[in-house]
Image (tube, helix red, strand yellow):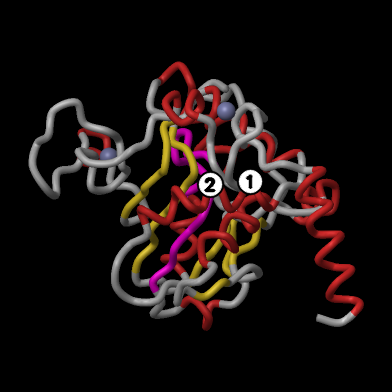
Amino acid sequence: MGLIGGLRGIVGAGLRFALPPRCPGCGVITPEMHQFCLDCWSALDFLGDPQCVRCGAPFEVDPGPGASCGACHADPPAFDSMRAAVAYGPIARALALKLKYVRRPGIAHTMAAQMRRHLPDGESRLVVPVPLHRWRIWRRGYNQSTLMARAVARGTSHVLAFETLVRTRATPSLRGLGPDQRAKTVRGAFAVRDRSAVKGRAVLLVDDVYTTGATAHACARALKRAGATRVDLICWARVVRDEDVAR
Ligand SMILES: [Zn+2]
Ligand SMILES: [Zn+2]
C-alpha cells in the first residue's frame, strides 16, 4: 500500500467512524449498511404469493397458480406483470421520499436488494426507468427511478437503457387524483426515442411507487408500440389499500 492508499485507508476508516450505518427507515444506528432496524423491518409488509399474476395485487385466499385479479381480468394492463417489494405504508413511503428529494444512492441499493427478489427469470432484459421530464431532471438533478434501475441491474446480465424511453411533456403531479384522472393526465406522455433498441426486446420497467398503474400503463403502451416483446414492471412499493391512492 502506497502513501495514497494508506491515506485513503485512514480517511475511509475515519468516515466509517464518523458515519455509522443507519436504518434507512428511521435513522437509528444499525450494525450493517443497508439494513433496517428490527422495528422498521417488522413494520414493512413484504409482498409475495399469493398475488395476481399480472398486477401483483395480494390475494387474501390463494386461488392457485396463474390467477389474475378481477380488475386485470376485466381490463388487462398494458404491461405483462408488475411486482413490488413492499406494500405502501409509512416506512416504504419514507424511503421513497428520501430517494426522491435527498440524493441518496445508498437508499436505492437498500430498495433494490428487496426488489431483486422479484426479478423475472430467463432472458437478459433491457432495464428502463420510468422517465422524468427533462425540466424536472434539471430542477432535481437526477431521476430517482434511474438510481433504482442502476442498483437493480448491478451485478446482473440485464442491460441498462436510460435514454430510450422519454417523457415528451411535463405532467402535473398525480397526487390526490383518482384513477381516471391519473390515466388521462399521463396518456401519450411517453415515447420511445430509439425504437431499434427496443424492438424484439423484453423490457424491465423500473418505478418507485405503483399507485393505480396509470404511469406504468402509459410507459408499457409506448414500449409495446415500439416492438417490445414483454414489459415487466418492478417497483419498490405498491399501494394496496384504496385510501393510499390519494397520497
Ligand atoms: Zn428503523
Ligand atoms: Zn391484477
| Residue occupying image coordinates x 78% and y 46% | 17
Q: Quadrant of the C terminus?
A: top right
On residue 86, the disc is none
Q: Is residue 206 magenta?
A: yes
Q: Which quarter of the rendered image does ligand 2 occupy?
A: top left
Q: Which residue is mark 2?
A: 111
For label 2, the crowd category at 10 Å Cα-Cα, with few meaning under 14, some 14 to 19 and many 20 or more, is many
Please name the amino acid that badge 1 sits on. Ile
Q: Which residues are magenta?
A: 202-217
Q: Position of residue 134 (x, y in %)?
A: 77, 56
Q: From the viewer's perspective, tell me whether residue 8 is left or right of residue 62.
A: right
Q: Is residue 130 magenta?
A: no
Quarter location, residue 23: top right
Q: Which residue is mark 1?
A: 107
| Residue occupying image coordinates x 31% and y 56% | 80
For label 1, the crowd category at 10 Å Cα-Cα, with few meaning under 14, some 14 to 19 and many 20 or more, is many
Mark 1 residue element: helix
Q: Position of residue 31 (x, y in %)?
A: 59, 40
Q: From the viewer's perspective, tell me whether residue 133 is left or right of residue 128.
A: right
| Residue occupying image coordinates x 53% and y 80% | 197
Q: From the viewer's perspective, tell me whether residue 116 is left or right of residue 9.
A: left
32 shown above or below 22: below
Please name the amino acid that badge 2 sits on. Met
| Residue occupying image coordinates x 59% and y 31% | 25
